[in-house]
Amino acid sequence: MTSQHDALYRAICEYPDEDTPRLAFADLLEEDGDPARAAFIRTQIELAQAPEYDPLWVKCRQFDPNAIRGWAMAHTLPRDVPAGFSWRNHLFRRGFPWLVEARRLAAFTDRAPEMFAAAPVQAIGVENRTGLAAFADCPHLARLTRIELSLTRLDADDTTRLGNSAHAANLAELAFAQDGIDADGLRALVESPLFGRLASLELRENVIVAELLVDALGAAGGPGNLRKLSLAACRLTRHDAANLFALPVLRDLDHLDLSDNALHADGVAALAESNITRGLRTLNLSQTLPGVPGIQALTEEKSRLARLRSLDLSANRLGPVAVKAVAEAAGLRKLRVLDLSSNHVGNAGAVALANSPHLGGLLELDLADAEVGDAGAVALAGSPHLDGLLRLNLRSRPPARPLGAAARRALRERFGRRVSLG
């Protein structure tokens, strides 16, 4: 790098919340003949300011998926990271590496300033709890906005230390996966000062009995600042649903991920009756098996999904009857992203979607591996309501029968590069 590059990069590392030096760096890259990386930085800065159902996100998923994760920019990752850190699961935000993996927390405690000088990271992923007390007392913790913990099985003492840390004021996102936290640890976290400041809490595949998970979340007197909650793969069932969805902590959520839980019809009906959905903008019910009764309960009231912008119903064994209930839901007029992939949508379901006046606001419709044949494809191509689609996914894996030439031609004439065919 030139001295000008170096100066700007140092400013980016020193002031990671600022976009101005990042944009100046992009301008310099373009002047130096690297327009691809310059465009990547600018696009990621725009993505950071928009929700994932925004047209820009949809366009990137269709035309430029690398702009979201940045795999093609792996060559730009700093190679001189301190010992104990790695880019094993690197993640870019706003054009630069944002998350770094630490083999153990002691690496952060001992060498955080070196890491921050190497890259503008604000998130850390860890798979070892050793050294948590020193980590919680480390002043450099104030730089982090997200921590991802897996295989750590944090207990009450651990989360009390972290939750009461004077240096955790900027933490906005916590993610626990694969036995990252136990039931007592979750309760202690919920009762700590940190929980009231969190905007996002993600729990996935943690070995916590569902009843204890609900009880721990119930220790929160209110939603605080929490806007995103993921309970994916938490072994929740319909028997836990009524108590879970009555909790105050879920009351003001924008984003709720319940995927990969056996909620079935009764559980999804309990979700609908709780009125939590009235405030949601993103709802993930993938692999929850709601069936026709669950879908009908969710969609029968016009106001129930009035704010919803993104709905994931993938991999639920839904057939045309359930899909028709979605298509006829007047409350989905503001929906922008609908995922029905890996369902038995078929031609009848595709026709219902194509003829729905309530889905005219869709920007993205995912029907991958949804058994849509020529008749359904032609109906989608001729729909009077889908002019706004930026992404239509009709990819299918063998042994699915490929679409015929006439259907493919009709889709290409209507949607051009906005349709993906397999």
Image (cartoon, grey):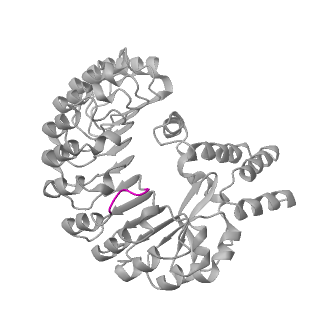
> Which residue: 41% across, 58% down?
224
Asked whether residue 422 appears in the rendered view, the answer is no
Horizontal and vertical percent position of residue 241: 18, 54
Residue 253 sits inside the magenta stretch: no
Q: Is residue 151 above or below residue 64?
A: below
Residue at the far front in the pictured view: 221
> Which residue: 61% across, 60% down?
97
Asked whether residue 42 appears in the rendered view, the answer is yes
Among the 4 quarters of the image, the one containing residue 310:
top left
In the displayed structure image, the side of residue 24 where residue 414 appears, left or right = left
Q: Magenta region's main secondary structure?
A: loop
Residue 223 sits inside the magenta stretch: yes
Q: Is residue 243 above or below residue 100?
A: above
Quadrant for the N terminus in the image: bottom right
Horizontal and vertical percent position of residue 68: 54, 47
In the displayed structure image, the side of residue 61 where residue 256 appears, left or right = left
Horizontal and vertical percent position of residue 323: 22, 31
User: Which of 397/83 is in front?
Assistant: 83
Q: Is residue 180 above or below residue 248?
A: below
User: Which of 24/15 is in front?
Assistant: 15
Among the 4 quarters of the image, the one containing residue 142:
bottom right
Quadrant for the C terminus in the image: top left
> Which residue: 22% across, 37% down?
298
| Range drawn in magenta | 221-225
Q: Is residue 146 above or below residue 369?
A: below
Horizontal and vertical percent position of residue 189: 38, 71
Among the 4 quarters of the image, the one containing residue 117:
bottom right
